[in-house]
Image: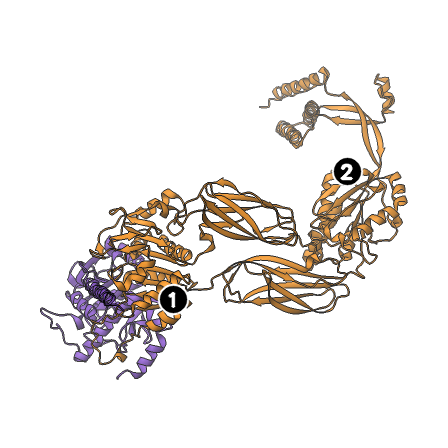
Chain colours: A orange, B purple
Amino acid sequence: MIFKILEILGIETRGYDRLLIHFAGINNAASIGVCAALVALFALSAWFMVKPLAGARRKILILGLHFLALIFALALFLEPSLRLAKTRKVKSPIAVLMDASESMKVKTDSGSTRIATALDWLKKNRDYFDSLSSDYELRFYRFDEKLKALPSAFLEAPELSAEGSQTEILEALLRLKSETGSGPLAGVIILSDGADRGELAQIATAQDARLKAKALKGLEKDLQGLGRIYPALAGSERELKDLALTGLTHDGYGFVKNPFVVVVKVRALGDIRGEFPVQLFQEDKLIVTKTVNLEPGKEQTLELEFKPDQVGRFLFKVALPVLEGEASAENNSRVFPLTILRDRIRVLYIVGNPSWDEKFLRRTLEKNPAVDLVSFYILREPYNNPKVGSDYELSLIPFPVDKLFQEELPNFDLVIFQNFFGMNYMPSSYIGNLRNYITDKGGALIYIGGPRAFLKNPFNDPLEEILPVDFEFSGSNYKFAQLSLRLTESGQQHPITNLAGEPLENQNLWEGVKVLENYNPVLRVKPDAVVLVAHKQENVAPLIAVREPGKGRVLMVATDSLWKWKFELEGESGSSRYYQLFWERALRWLMRDPEMKSVSLSSFRDRFQPGEDSSLFFSVQDSSYHPISGATVSLSTLAAPEGCAPSSVPGEEVSPGKYQFKLTLNCPGGYRFAAAAQKDGAVIGSDQAILAVEKESKEMEDLSLRPDLLELLASAGDGKLLKLPDAPDQLKFPKLQLEEIVGAKDFPLWNSWLSFAMFVLLFGALWALRRYFSLS
Amino acid sequence: MKRRDFVKISAASLFGSSLGKSAWAQFQEPRTKKYDFFFAQAVYGKNLNWNPRPSVARSLASIVSSRTSVPASPERVEIKLTDKELFSYPFLYLSGQDAFEPFSDEEIQKLRRWIDAGGFLLADDAMGEPDSGFDQSFRRELSRIFPGEKLNAVPSDHTVFQSYYLVDKVAGRKAAVPNLWGIDRGDLTVLMYSQNDLAGAIEQGPGSSFRFSPEPGGEAQREMAIRLWVNIVFYALCANYKKDLIHIPFISERRKHRPK
C-alpha cells in the first residue's frame, strides 16, 4: 500500500522490500540528550504560557501550537528520512568453542587425548554439522585464557593443539558475546573437559548459599543472547591416572638453623591409592622425604620441614614419583629458588668502660631482633677500689677471656671492641686469635674509638694488622675537637654511608653532623682500606673506614661521640633514623648481606615462563662501590634442566658498571648461572644467580574432568550436557528471523523550505499570541 | 741459638716491653682528661630551691671515678630545661626541698622529648620525708610530663639494684621511704625518684668531710647510699646490661653468699 503511494508520488520502489524511517541526526547518545532537552524546553515554555490563561480554548490553542513547533524543531534536528531498503535473510549463527587449554592433552581411556577426542567427534559427526550449516552459520573458535576465531573451513580438516595455559570457559563466552556485538546467536557448543580455572569454577565452589544464588542469576544474565548452551564433555575419568602436586607454599626467606616449612598439596586421580614418597631436594641433595597416603580424588596436605645449614641462595625441588601410565608427569615436580639468611647475628660486645656511646649503640643493637648480644663491660680497673669486704657485694663477673678468645670466638658472627685495650685482661695471643678469626674464618669486627683505642703497643699489633689504619707512634691517641665531617667519594657510594640515596642529600646529611667532639687522630690509612668519612679539618684523617683483611670484614669508627649524633639529632628533629640506619647498614655489610655485594648478578624476577625473554643484570663495582665500565664479563651456566643449557650470551653494558645478559629459557626447571668480570687482566669478582622456569598456570595441577561445571553452564544456558561420543542430533537450536540490509535509498523528510517555513510560522504565531494574551 | 741471635731477641724484647709501658702510661693518663659521666642538674624556678646540695657533683665524681672504671666529671653542668644543650647530657638530676611553681609548657615538652630520646632523669627530694612540698610539686609536674601514668615502686630485682653493687636497701641522708620510684618506657626505667635525700648522704663540705650524718643508720647507711648512687649512674650508662643471660647465674650465686 505504502509502496503504491510512493510510486504514485513518483518514487522508484522496484527492488526494495522494506520501508523504514531513518533519523540521520541520531549519531550518538549526545544527540538523544539534545532531543530530550528540546522536549523539556518546549514543555516548560508551554507550561508558563498556559498557566496564566483563563479559557480552555486558549490553552488548547497554545498547547497545540507548541506541540507542532516541537515536531518541526525535532524534525530539523533529527533529520528524518524515508528509507527504502533491500534486505536479505541470514542464517542464525551457532558458535562451536574448542577448549585448547593444556589439560586437553591428557589421554583418555581410548588412548587418544581429550582434544583428539573432541576433534574426532567433529569429524565423525560431519554430516550432522553439514546439515546444520544449511540453516545455521557455524562459527568455530578455540579458547583457553583467550578466545580466537578459527578458519571457516575448520570443519573440513579439524586440527588443534592444546597448549593454552588456562581454561576459562565463562570468560570465553563473554568474549564471544562482545565479539558478536548485539547480534544474537542461536546457540553455542562447547567442547571441553570442564577443567575451568576461571569464574565458572568460582561460582560452582561458592560456599555461601545466598552468594551462590546471586552468582547463578548473574550467570544466566551473562549467557543471554548466546542462545542455547550445549557443553560437550571430552574425556573420560575412568582410566585417568595422575599424581599431582596441586599446591606449594613457603615463606619468602629461610634462616640458618631455624626450621623451614614447605607446605605441599598432593592429589591422586584415577586408580591411584597407597603410600607415596614426597621428596624435597636442595640443589641435587635430597634433604627431606615424607610419605603421603593417597586415595583417588582426595587432596592431602603435608609439611616438609628442614633446617637450612648454609647461608646463600639455593634451588629447591619438591618431587613426586612418576607412575607408569600417568596422564602427565609435568605436575609431579615443582622448583623454587630460596634465599637462606643468617638466623641471628651473634655479637660479642666488649666495652672498655661504660659510656653514652656504648649505651646508645647497645640500645640500637638491642632493637634489632636479629641480633644476639653477649656483652662484657670493664666496670672496674685494677686501680679502682670499690670499698667492699668481699667481691660477693659486687655484681661484677669475671671476664671469661680464655673461654671467649680460645673457644667461643668462632661461634660469633661479629666482635665489637669499643674503647677497649685488653692488655690487663688477656695475653696478646688472644688478639692474635681475633685476627685469625677475621682473616681466616671470615669473621667481622667493629672497632670503635676512645681514649683506650688505637694505642700503639705490641699488644695491639695483631689488631693493627687487620684494621684499615696503622697506628702512629707519637702523639696522643685521642683528641678533643668539634669535628666537621667530609663524606669521601667512596663514602658517597658505599652502602654503609649512602644513607639518603641522593648524592647531594647524602653529602648534606653527613656534613650536617656537627656534634662530634672526640676522635682518635694520626692514623695512616692502609692501601687496601676504604675511607668513607674523614675529618674536614685534617683532610686525610679517617673517621669511618672499612677493610676486608683475608676472608673477613672490619669497620673502624675513630670516635666515641657518635652517640651525640643520635641524641642531639633526636632533640632537634625528633628523629635519629640516620644513626640507626648507619648501624643497621654497617651490620648488613659486615654480615655480607647479598644486597650489598659490590659484584652482583641479579634479575628483576626469579621466575619465568618457558620461552619467556629474561635478563640477568651484572653489577660490577670496585671495593669502594664505584662502577667499573669497560669490564670483560662472561656468563656460564652451572646448572640447567637436561639438554636445556642456554648457549653463551655476551654481556652488554647498559649503564656504567651494569651489564645485561639477555636469555631465553625454554625448559621448565631450575637454572644456576655464574658471571665473572675482569679488567686489564685482573679479576674483579664473580657472582651467581638462580632462576626458576615454571608454567605459571594451575592448569596441570588438577586434571580432573569437571562435568559438574559444564552441567551448571548447560542449565543456565537452557541447554544440555553431552558426553562424547553422544550423538549431536539431540541438540536443538532456535531459528532466529534474522535479516540484513544489503541496499538502501533515503528520501529526506525535513530538507525542504516548507518544513523550515512551518517552523518559523509556528514560532511567529506563538510570539504573536503571547503579545495578544498580554503574556510577559 | 747463636749469641748474636740471643742479643737480637733480648734487644727486641726490651724494646717491646718499654714500648708497652710507654703506651700503657699514655692510656692511663690521656693528655686531655676525658669524662664519660657528666652530672647535669636541672635549674628551674625563680629562687635557689633547685640547688639544695650544691657540691654533690664533686662528691659523686670522686666516688664514681675512684670506685669504678667510669671517669666522672667533678664539674656540675647547670642546665635549664629549655636550653638547647639539654640534649648534650643524657643524665639529669632534679632536686629541691620546697614546693615549686609549675614548669612552663615548653619545659614540659622539652623534658618529655629528652626522655623519649634516651635521657635518664633522677629526682631527689632533699627534705627526705614523705609528702613534702617538693614531693607534691614534683608529682604534679610528673602528671603533666607523663599524663595518665604514675610512679611505681622500683622492684627489688630491678637492674638498678645490681648494676655494680648488690644493693637491697634504699636510703639516703634519711631512710624515710624504703623505695625508689620509677616510670618505665618498655624495658627501661627512664625516671627514678628518691624521697630520702640521696645527695645529702654523699655531699662533702669544704675539705673531704661529709656535710650530714645519715639518719638513722649513720655511716653504714651512707655506704648504702653511696652504693645506690653508683648503681644509679651505672644503670643510666649501661641500662639493662646486667640482665644479660650471662650475668644472671653469677649474680644469683653472689646474692646467696653475700655477707648479711
Residue B145: x %, y % from top left: 30, 61
Is residue A558 shown to the viewer in this render? no
SS assignment at label 2 = loop
Viewer-closest of A435 and A355: A435
Horizontal placement of A117 versus A613: left or right? right
- Indicate whether A184 appears above or below A53: below
Residue B178: x %, y % from top left: 26, 77
Point 70% across, 45% down: residue: A146
SS assignment at label 1 = strand
Q: Which residue is most to the left? A: B206
Horizontal placement of A589 versus A23: left or right? left
- The residue singled out by tag 1 in the image is A373
Q: In the rendered structure, which amino acid carries the disc numbered 2?
A: Gly
Point 71% across, 65% down: residue: A298
Tell which circle, 1 or 2, labels the residue nearer the N-terminal end.
2
Point 68% across, 60% down: residue: A332
Which mark is in front, 1 or 2? 1
- Indicate whether A569 appears above or below A45: below
Q: Which mark is residue A183?
A: 2
Locate the N terminus of chain A and report the quarter of the image it occupies: top right
Same chain for marks 1 and 2?
yes
Q: CA distance from mark 1 to mark 2?
A: 75 Å
Q: Which mark is residue A729?
A: none
Q: In the rendered structure, which amino acid carries the disc numbered 1?
A: Leu
- What is the chain letter for disc 2? A
